[in-house]
Every structure is written in C-alpha cells, then in structure tokens.
Image: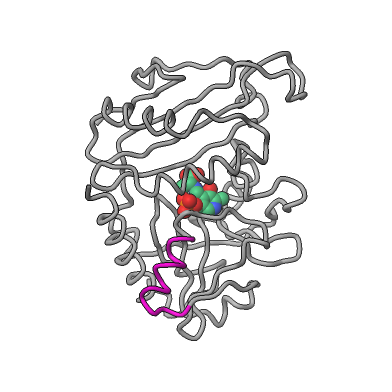
Amino acid sequence: MTFQINIDGTITDAEQATISVLDRGFLYGDSVYEVIRTYNGKPFALELHLNRLNQSAGRLGIPLPDRDVLTNELHRTLHQAGNDESYCRIIVTRGSGPLNLDPTTAVDPKTVIMVKHLDPLPDQVYEQGLRLAIPKVRRTSREALDPAIKSGNYLNSVLALAEVRKRGFDDALLLDRHGRITESTSSNVFVVIDGALVTPPLETGLLAGVTRGLILSLAEQNQISCREQQLTPTDLIAAQEVILTSTLREVISVVAVDDRRIGTGTPGPMAAKLRKILRRYAIEATQH
Ligand code: PDD
C-alpha cells in the first residue's frame, strides 16, 4: 500500500517528490490532469482518459509526451507501487520560466504521475446517498474558462464545495449563469424523469466525464431510455432520482438537494442498477 510519484520518468516515494515553485502549475494552475482508477489492478478506460487529456492540453496549448510514453510510465509507476487497486493522477504542466503570465516564455514542462492506494467509498455511503446543495457560486462559462478543459485550476469547484460544506452538505450542484444545471464539483449529474435517464448536454458547459459517456452508452445497451436535455432546479422536483457519476464515485445516489427530498429520500433503483452495470463492465474490461 504505497504512494509513488513519477516525475519525468523518475519514480520515488511521495514524500521525496518535489517540483519547482516556479512551475506554472503551482503559480497559475497552468496544467492539465486526469484521474484514473484501476479495476483488477489495471487502469480502466485509460484510452478515454488520455483522449480527454489530449483535448484539454490541446485547448491550452500545453505539449504532451507521446501517448505510449504516458502509458508506459503509468504502468511502471503502478508496478512500483504494487497496490491491489490504485488511484492514479496524471498531471502535465506547462513548465516554468520568468514570473510572468506569457505562456510562450515557459520551458521545462513536467509530467507527474501519482499512484496511491485506492480507498473506495464505503458501502455505507452508497446506502445513505449524498445530500447536495446549489451554491451561489456559478459554473464558469464556456467563454471564460471552459469546464470541458480539465485544467489544474479547480478554484470554481473549490469555492462551490467550500460554500456548501459550510452549510453541512456533502457536495455542490452548480448552475450556469442562466440557472441551468451543469454538474457537481467533481462528478456529472443525471436525473431520472418518468423512468428515463436525463443529463445536461455538453453545450451547457461541463466536463465530458468518462463515466458519463460510458453510462450513456451502457444505458442504451441495457434498454434504459436516456437523453441529453437542459435541466433546471425545477426539474429536480419531478425527478424520481438524482445520480452523480465519476471515476471515483462510479454511480451514486443523491437523496436531497438543498432541503428538498429527491423521490423517496433514499437511494433509488436506477442508481443501483447503473452502478452494477458499470462495475461489471469495468471488471470485464480489465480482465486481461
Ligand atoms: N473528477 N466533472 C468534474 C468537474 C470532474 O472533475 C470530474 C472528474 C467529473 C467526472 O469525470 P470522470 O467520469 O471522467 O471521472 C465531472 C475526477 C474524478 C477528479 O478530479 O478527482
């Protein structure tokens, strides 16, 4: 059960890993990242995560190492850590340079791969479900800092989470500036309306979650009706279930939003079914 960090190919214990304070990832959040987890000890949906890393880096103009270098280094770090299951984070920063914002002055980009033991959410959390609140903080617009870019700047999510935690809630459900539901601070959102699975479209301004994409296609394969549609807080009143999806949470029920109960106020059958379908798929996909 170790925590290993790989910086540009050198793997050390986490405590020994250091990076310059002049790195723009530290100074400005000028970096991109992915969080991946293993099933059967192997990274799940790695290609999809690397595709997104590529898209995020492309949007910011941050150069990435070759895909096979990233893949090899991740496997090497996983091997060195030797955990049964791991949480993996790949970070690529623009590098360092003089203390100015100009990205063209950056040199020495860094690739950091963190691998630590995966502590999955306890069953009890799935059995209880999450209580969410809608914060005053709005999701950044696509025209400002597009939430589709998974950058190292997570202050929008940090502010939203701080606000709702102060009020005793588990997580935040962020609206865009028009009052439409976007996503949670580190998960995508689905709603069950009349038995159908509904999620806001990417155009709303949200991260194209790997789990979100998988759930949309697995739902279809399992004859569960699903669609992308704009949602507002009013839609939550009619919702039978509200569900969050992410790499780490997989599929989890939301039992309340602000002080309003969702459905029966207990985790619903759709979330349980989708979690089972996703886990079965992930375990099969990482078998060999
Ligand atoms: N979070 N929305 C946001 C803002 C996220 O940060 C994430 C991922 C998701 C879900 O994406 P995926 O299904 O690809 O994990 C949605 C990861 C887990 C994190 O930063 O820890």
Q: Quadrant of residue 35?
A: top left
Task: Report x, y in % for residue 219.
Answer: 41, 72
Above or below residue 40? Residue 256 is below
The answer to if 50 sits in the magenta stretch is no
Between 39 and 246, the one nearer to me in the picture: 39
Q: Quadrant of residue 118?
A: top left
Q: Please provide the residue range marked out in magenta.
A: 213-225
Residue at (48%, 63%) from the top-left corner?
131
The residue lying furthest to the bottom in this view is 194
Above or below residue 107? Residue 257 is below
Query: Is 268 left, or right, of 225 in this rendering?
Result: left
Please state the total of marks drawn on the protein image: 0
Between 150 and 185, the one nearer to me in the picture: 150
Task: Report x, y in % for residue 285.
Answer: 29, 54
The answer to if 224 sits in the magenta stretch is yes
Residue 186 makes an appearance in the image: no
Q: Quadrant of the N terminus?
A: top left
Above or below residue 152? Residue 190 is below
Color style of the picture: one colour
Residue at (51%, 55%) from the top-left corner?
209
Residue at (76%, 24%) from the top-left corner?
101
Q: Main secondary structure of the magenta part?
A: helix
Above or below residue 75? Residue 22 is above
Query: Is 225 left, or right, of 83 in this rendering?
Result: right
Residue 56 makes an appearance in the image: yes
Query: Is 189 left, or right, of 10 in this rendering?
Result: right
Residue at (28%, 48%) from the top-left corner?
39
Task: Report x, y in % for residue 194.
Answer: 49, 86
Task: Report x, y in % for residue 47.
Answer: 43, 46
